[in-house]
Image (spheres, rainbow, N blue to C red):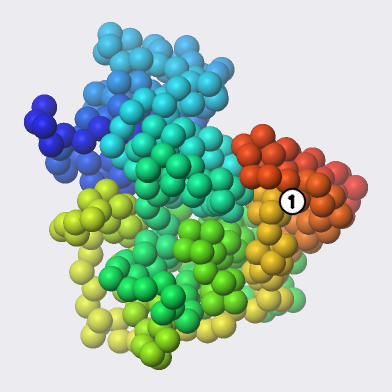
Amino acid sequence: MSGDTRKISIFGATGSIGESTLDLIGRDPQAYEVVALTGGHNIARLAEQARQFNAQVAVTAHESRLDELRDALAGTGIEAAAGQGALDEAACRPVDWAMSAIVGAAGLEPGLRVLEHHGTLALANKESLVCAGPLLMATAQAHHARVLPVDSEHSAVFQGLVGEDIDAVERIIITASGGAFRDWPLDQLADATLDQASSHPNWDMGQRITIDSASMFNKALELIETKEYFGVDPAKIEVLVHPQSLVHAIVGFNDGGMMAHVGPPDMRHAIGYALHWPERRALPVERLDLAAIGQLEFRAPSDIRYPALRLAREVMAAGGMSGAIFNAAKEIALDGFIAGTIGFMDMGAVVEEALDRLSADTGLVHAAFTLDNVRAADQMGRVTAQEIIDAGL
């Protein structure tokens, strides 16, 4: 391999972000040495990826699937491993660049390990910033590592700030598709079914992220993520519903000017920008025909339709471990909706009640930002949300 070959790992390789990352890497395979690939239950695909890119190690999060992964990699010389310890060990292997695309709070610890070993972390796992933004960014600073945003909205803001002074920013607008129910009558939302919530009007994503889009919990997390990554006053952060999903974010400056990032709804753009940063290289994404598109639509989101946005602002105001509690309760509420235990609009009610109950525990909420304390807040958020569901709200 050439001296310019970059060592990379992908945490969450079998998900849509991981697949898109490997698509880009596969177009210039001589430029990269793949160290670790991790996944969940899709063992066949994880093994296929590991073979295709000759990874050093493939890790499944589920220890019960280790034998299956070993069998799938037999004779290849590729290590097979499983469980949280194996994920942490993989994250400790030195790399130049790592993609953090594990869904949920489980993505935090591998990301911290990458930063502790001075790697650049491309962050698609928004929960890391929501649950432990100060810890993540402080870890990066302490180890002279770097965090690059991969959410399309935050990548767009990041690009809009190139060469700009953050103190000159008056507002940051992140956009949302509005999800499956953006045009539904409000009085019908309580009766929305799982199948209806699992169908996105603009693109095909995994079930959980699609439901989070419909409830706008996904955007609520991104509000908090924006505050934590860019360090801006929450009052400067806005959300607009943009059904076309072509304007990903807008940065407004103190001279009244606004800089919008416009592009196709293809995650390979944000991934590619992080992969090649600080350079900008050609990417295999659609080129927009603005004349054919004709018009772009924007509207203010309703807090009644999307209570998650109001809750996110309350979380930002409260600070501390509120983000970890919020995310944990959200994950449990989503589980409850998928299982049919609660209705679509009940998810917001569960999260709000969990926040209300735990906000009284100031020792929990305002504990120091350590990994153990984040884990404790996460666990309390999950337990409390489940108790609320079990009690029938």
Drawn side of residue 161 relative to residue 318, left or right: left
Q: Quadrant of residue 98?
A: top left
How many numbered circles are shown? 1
Q: In this view, does 268 lie above or below 97?
A: below
Report if residue 283 is visible in the image.
Answer: no
Give, as a three-letter code, the residue at label 1.
His
Q: Position of residue 28 (x, y in %)?
A: 14, 41
Instruction: Give how far across and how far down residue 335 sits, in percent.
Output: 68, 45
Quadrant of the frame with the N terminus: top left
Residue plotted at (56% across, 51% down): 134
Q: Position of residue 265 (x, y in %)?
A: 35, 64
The kind of secondary structure element at disc 1 is loop
Q: Residue furthest bottom?
A: 256
**Along the line of sight, which residue is nearer the eye, 212 or 162?**
162
Viewer-proximal residue among 70 and 328: 328
Q: In this view, does 181 lie above or below 56?
A: below
Tell me which residue sits at (23%, 46%) in the image. Answer: 24
Residue drawn at (42%, 86%), measured in percent from left and top? 254
| Image quadrant assignment for residue 115 | top left
The residue lying furthest to the right in this view is: 391
Taking the image as drawn, is residue 133 in sight?
yes
Residue found at the far left of this picture: 2
Residue of label 1: 366
Bin the neighbour count of mark 1 within 10 Å (Cα to Cα): few under 14, some 14-19, many 20 and up: some
282 lies left or right of 207: left
Residue drawn where x is 49% and y is 31% of the image = 40
Q: Quadrant of the C terminus?
A: bottom right
Q: Residue 245: x percent and y percent?
A: 41, 71
